[in-house]
């Protein structure tokens, strides 16, 4: 039984030792061209993947892993680097800011140019197109203005020229006005009051607007240094096109001194599966079970 326990612990240690943390992947690059051709007297199928990078780009982002394609298995043969002079193309975005006397987005869009020519600090040039979804209009600030209001009311048939008979305030177009002056007239029997009311109204208005908009597109620089990497993949024909058979599980060797079954044969599939946590639990309960059998004896 001691040999069986030692064997299980060794298997568990070996499996747990293979667990590693994944490394951080570099930024992946994509090929500018892919060429499939035959090579050599046996017409071996090969694939060349060409990548163009700037001198500051990290080439470790170029995929070099093996892959299957059209019934063949491809593997990296060589990686060729070549420094050359060419055209470096890259995406570019330019954001502009301008003042506007209107906050109407439709009117602002009419005033913006549909495209713009740019030259970057490192010498790339190109034509950028207005991104309509990027246009934003913001108010720069607010001020308050006041204006004078006035209205006239006539009150005929008054018994006397008495100010108490004339309303002191009125509402005109939703604004409250106050009595400012009264002119009296009489027909010998009744009096008519012509009253003038005044007031002020205030309103808040924007002092101006700020417009921001982005132009996007590609810019290019000729006669610049470009690094070309060519990944060369050789290939072999895949064995069969069907689904690969599952490998047979490797059983845990039996203790030659153990002539009777103790119920631990079920651990073999767990070892083949490589599940560290499951295997640890299996070892624990297996050891506990074997100890229990030993105490019974």
Image (cartoon, grey):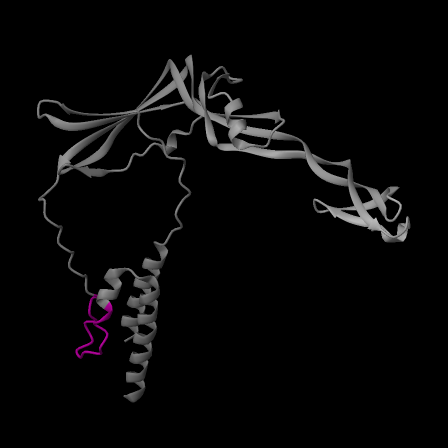
Residue 130 x/y as whole percent: 47, 25
* Above or below, comparing residue 200 to residue 59 in the picture: below
Q: Is residue 225 left or right of residue 149?
A: left
* Above or below, comparing residue 213 to residue 146 in the picture: above
Spot the residue most to the front: 188
Residue depicted at 63% across the width and 27% down the height = 101
Q: Is residue 154 left or right of residue 268?
A: right
Q: Is residue 291 left or right of residue 109?
A: left
Q: Quadrant of the C terminus?
A: bottom left
Spot the residue most to the bottom: 296
Residue 157 x/y as whole percent: 82, 50
Spot the residue most to the top: 223
Q: 16 or 127: which is nearer to us?
A: 127
Q: Is 143 part of what is drawn in magenta?
A: no
Q: 193 or 233: which is nearer to us?
A: 193
Residue depicted at 20% across the width and 28% down the height = 47
Q: 173 or 55: which is nearer to us?
A: 173
Residue 30 x/y as whole percent: 33, 30
Residue depicted at 34% across the width and 54% down the height = 18
Q: Is 256 part of what is drawn in magenta?
A: yes
Q: Is residue 229 left or right of residue 186?
A: left
* Above or below, comparing residue 271 to residue 292 in the picture: above
Residues drawn in magenta:
252-267
* Above or below, comparing residue 38 to residue 175 in the picture: above
The mark total stands at 0
Q: Quadrant of the N terminus?
A: bottom left
Q: Main secondary structure of the magenta part?
A: loop
Residue 187 x/y as whole percent: 86, 43
């Amino acid at each position: 039984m001691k040999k069986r326990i030692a064997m299980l612990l060794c298997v568990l240690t070996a499996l747990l030792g293979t667990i590693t943390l994944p490394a951080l992947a570099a930024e992946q690059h994509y090929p500018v061209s892919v060429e499939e051709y035959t090579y050599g007297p046996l017409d071996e199928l090969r694939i060349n993947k060409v990548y163009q990078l700037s001198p500051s780009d990290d080439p470790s982002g170029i995929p070099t892993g093996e892959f299957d394609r059209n019934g063949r298995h491809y593997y990296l043969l060589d990686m060729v680097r070549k420094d050359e002079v060419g055209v470096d193309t890259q995406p570019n975005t330019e954001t502009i800011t301008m003042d506007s006397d209107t906050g109407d987005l439709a009117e602002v869009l009419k005033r913006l140019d549909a495209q713009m020519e740019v030259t970057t600090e490192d010498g790339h040039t190109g034509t950028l197109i207005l991104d309509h979804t990027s246009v934003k209009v913001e108010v720069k600030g607010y001020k308050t203005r006041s204006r004078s209001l006035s209205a006239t009311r006539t009150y005929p048939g008054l018994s006397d020229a008495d100010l108490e008979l004339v309303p002191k305030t009125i509402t005109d177009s939703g604004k409250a006005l106050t009595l400012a002056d009264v002119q009296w007239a009489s027909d010998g029997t009744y009096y008519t009051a012509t009253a003038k009311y005044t007031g002020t109204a205030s309103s808040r208005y924007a002092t101006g607007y700020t417009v921001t908009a982005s132009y996007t597109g590609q810019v290019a620089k000729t006669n610049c240094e470009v690094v070309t990497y060519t990944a060369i993949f050789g290939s072999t024909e895949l064995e069969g096109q069907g689904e690969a058979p599952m490998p047979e599980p490797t059983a845990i060797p039996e203790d030659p001194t153990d002539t009777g079954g103790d119920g631990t044969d079920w651990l073999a599939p767990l070892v083949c599966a490589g599940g560290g946590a499951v295997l640890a639990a299996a070892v624990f309960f297996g050891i506990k079970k074997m100890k229990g059998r030993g105490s019974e004896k």
